[in-house]
Amino acid sequence: GWTCQGVTPSNEIESIAFDIIKLIGMTPARGGRIDEYPYKGLGGVGYTFYQPLTDSYIIFDVYPEIDETKVVLASCKPYNHQGVGILLRRLIGPLIQQGSFIL
């Protein structure tokens, strides 16, 4: 996953997700979903965008209070991890952390 310094408005995050999905050659399984916070008075300020993929999922957790976006991309097939990081830097902001793991 990656942590970027910067946030993206919720009405633009789906476009960023689809840029990444196109870059790595995967396919959305169905429409994505945004949950905004706080929910019923709980949680910080921000939102989470979920996009299921035929090969797994991509999730963005966006935290305006601390100017960060966390991205998790799970996959059952290899993808261009470095390319995703480059794209995230261009579209959201500098990378604070990045790493990967195999499910």
Image (tube, rainbow, N blue to C red):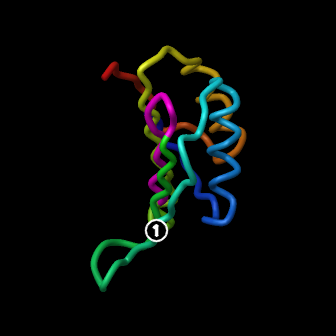
Which quadrant of the rendered structure holds the N terminus?
Answer: top left
Which quadrant of the rendered structure holds the C terminus?
Answer: top left
Which quadrant of the structure image shows residue 72?
Answer: top left
Vertical comparison of 70 with 45: above or below: above
Q: Residue at x 50, y 14 (%)?
A: 78
Element assignment for label 1? strand
Q: Residue at x 60, y 40 (%)?
A: 94
Which quadrant of the structure image shows residue 40?
Answer: bottom left
Residue 95 image offset from top left, x and y in percent: 54, 37
Residue 81 image offset from top left, x and y in percent: 54, 21
Q: Decide if residue 43 is on the left or right side of residue 55.
A: left
Q: Residue furthest left?
A: 42
Nearer to me, 76 or 40: 76
Vertical comparison of 3 with 38: above or below: above
Q: Per the image, is 56 magenta? A: yes
Vertical comparison of 62 with 59: above or below: below
Q: Residue at x 59, y 18 (%)?
A: 80
Q: Decide if residue 30 is on the left or right side of residue 59.
A: right
Q: Decide if residue 86 is on the left or right side of residue 50.
A: right
Q: Residue furthest bottom?
A: 41
Residue 11 image offset from top left, x and y in percent: 67, 66
The magenta span reads: 53-62
Which quadrant of the structure image shows residue 7?
Answer: bottom right
Q: Residue at x 64, y 22 (%)?
A: 83
Nearer to me, 94 or 46: 46
- The residue indicated by pointer 1 is 46
- Magenta-highlighted stretch: main secondary structure? strand
Vertical comparison of 50 with 85: above or below: below
Q: Disc 1 marks which amino acid?
A: Gly
